[in-house]
Image (cartoon, rainbow, N blue to C red):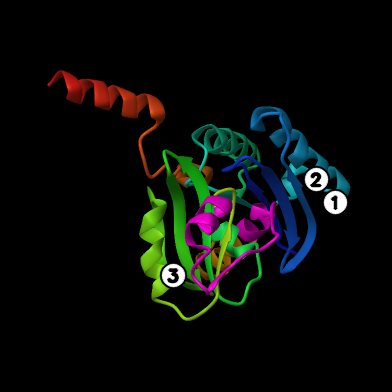
Amino acid sequence: MQLVILGVDCSSKQSSVCIMQDDRVVYTAVQATNTTHSQNFLPMIQGALTVCGYRPKDVDLYAITTGPGSFTGLRIGMAVIKGMASATNTACIGVSSLKALAKSVDFNGVIIPAFDARRKQVYACVMDGEDVICDDFCRDVSVLEKYIKDTEKDVYFVGDGKNMCYNTYKEHGNVKQNSVEMPCIALGACLLAKVEYDANGGKTHFDLSPSYLRLSQAERELKEKMEAQQ
C-alpha cells in the first residue's frame, strides 16, 4: 500500500506544494505572485490533488513547514492543514522551514538556508549534508562568518535572504553564487517528514504549532514602548 504524502509550505514569499507516493515525487508546484498566501495557497493544494487524481481522504500524511518565516504565512498554512487533517483524521508532521529549504536543493558543500527577517537579520541555520552545524536562529547576518571560516567546503546560500548573505560574504573564496531562486520547499518538507514517519510514525494536527523564533512586530513595538516608559 502506497503512502501518499502532501507537503506544503508558505513560510516565505512563495507558496509550494508537493505530493509524494512513498519515495517517489509525483507533483511539485511553486508560486510567487503579488497575491497573498490566503488567495493562492488553498487553490494550489486543490490543483495538486486534482492533477494527481486524489481527494483529501486519499492523503495519508500531511507534511508542513512550521517556521521560522513569515508570521502570516505560517498561520495561514497551519490553519489550512489543521482543518484538512482534522476533517479526515489524517496524520501530520511539522518540520523546520529552513531545514526543508536545505533539503530541497542539491549542492555539494555547506548549505545555509536563509530567509530575510528584516532589520538586517536573517532566519537561518547551517547544514553540512544531514548534519546540523547550527540550528535555526534569528540573528544579524554577521553571525554566519564563523561558520564560513570554519569550513574548507564550498558554502551555498539559498532562500530569499541569499542575496543579502552572499553580498556580505562574497569575498570569502569558498562562498559560491548559485542561480536557484525558487526551490520547492514543500519537497524538502515531504522528504524530512517521510524520514520522521518511517522512524516514529505520524502525529495529529493538535501537535502542530508554529516556530516563530522572535516576537511579532506588534509585540516588539509594545515591548520597546514599555521599556521606554520605565
Q: Evaluate if marks 2 and 1 touch, with contact meaning CB atoms under 8 Å apart.
A: yes
Q: Amino acid at mark 3?
A: Ile
**What are the residue bounds of the magenta stretch?**
162-190
Q: Amino acid at mark 2?
A: Leu
Residue identified by numbered label 3: 148
Quadrant location of the C terminus in the rendered image: top left
Q: Real-space Cα distance between discs 3 and 2? A: 41 Å
Q: Real-space Cα distance between discs 2 and 1? A: 5 Å
Q: In the figure, residue 3 lies in which quadrant?
A: bottom right
Give the answer, above or below, for where 37 lies relative to 146.
above
**Which residue is drawn at the image coordinates 54% and 49% (left, top)?**
161
Query: Is disc 1 placed on a helix, strand or loop?
Result: helix
Which label is found at residue 52?
1
- Residue 218 drawn at (x, y percent): 38, 24
Name, please, the residue furthest toward the bottom: 152
Disc with the residue nearer the chain's start (3 vs 1): 1
Query: Is disc 2 placed on a helix, strand or loop?
Result: helix
Q: In the figure, is residue 158 to the left or right of 141?
A: right
Let me know if residue 93 appears in the view: no
Q: Is residue 186 magenta?
A: yes
- Residue 212 drawn at (x, y percent): 42, 42
Q: In the figure, is residue 223 to the left or right of 22?
A: left
Query: Is disc 3 placed on a helix, strand or loop?
Result: helix
Which label is found at residue 49?
2
Q: In the figure, residue 225 lies in which quadrant?
A: top left
